[in-house]
Amino acid sequence: MSPTLTRRRLLAGIAGTVGIAGTAGVAAWAGGVFDGTRLVGPTSDVVARAEAARRRAGAGTVTAMLNPRPVTLDLGGQQVQTWGYAESGPGSLIRARAGDLLRVEVINGLPGTTSVHWHGVALRNDMDGVPGVTQDPIAAGGRHTYEFTAPDPGTYFYHPHSGVQLDRALYGVLVPPRV
């Protein structure tokens, strides 16, 4: 006769499974990104090697500038005050080939902090644009340069991860086509 599955047995089984998985996760983390003395930082050799591996032979450097600021947009005859990277809707189209180095300077013309998140792009953590998590927010009047290798062809978009700024027309398109 099989034992009855009680709530207590179920919870004990789940706790045991989570404990084993958690222990394995910590062991993997300790052996991968933690060298026993410090976490891997954005200027470490590990990050430099990973970025170099993403570059392709003959790759170029693509530079762009984003200036989030108050703008007036014409929405089919209706003038609205909002924020944007450009005077007419989406921010500039940024084109870079997969494997190119992308260097985007952001000059914050907004009354508050901002950031730029590169949506869907596999990139180094310190360039991901999540203020308070992967970077410090860009202060009003401040500057920040995002620099990373465009890893994969496709169509992506960029936008802030600061409050409801995306809802105010702060977005644009990033296209790294095939080589």
Image (spheres, grey):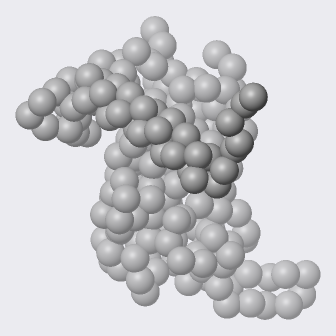
Q: Tell me residue 109's x, y (percent).
A: 43, 77
Q: Tell me residue 142's x, y (percent).
A: 31, 71
Name the residue rendered at 51%, 46% in the picture. 12
Name the residue rendered at 73%, 81% in the picture. 73
Comparing 129 with 27, the one in front is 27
Q: Tell me if residue 88 can be seen.
A: yes
Left or right of 34 in this view: 143: right
| Displayed quadrant of residue 51 | top left
Position of 161 relative to 172 (above/below): below
Left or right of 123 in this view: 93: right
Name the residue rendered at 40%, 76% in the picture. 113
Name the residue rendered at 16%, 27% in the picture. 35
Q: Tell me residue 94's x, y (percent).
A: 61, 44
Left or right of 115 in this view: 140: left
| Displayed quadrant of residue 171 | bottom right
| Displayed quadrant of residue 115 | bottom left
Q: Tell me residue 9's x, y (percent).
A: 58, 46
Quarter containing the C terminus: top right
Comparing 129 with 29, the one in front is 29
Comparing 150 with 38, the one in front is 38
From this viewpoint, which residue is outermost toward the front? 1
From this viewpoint, which residue is outermost toward the right? 76
From this viewpoint, which residue is outermost toward the left? 37
Quarter containing the N terminus: top right
Q: Tell me if residue 106 can be seen.
A: no
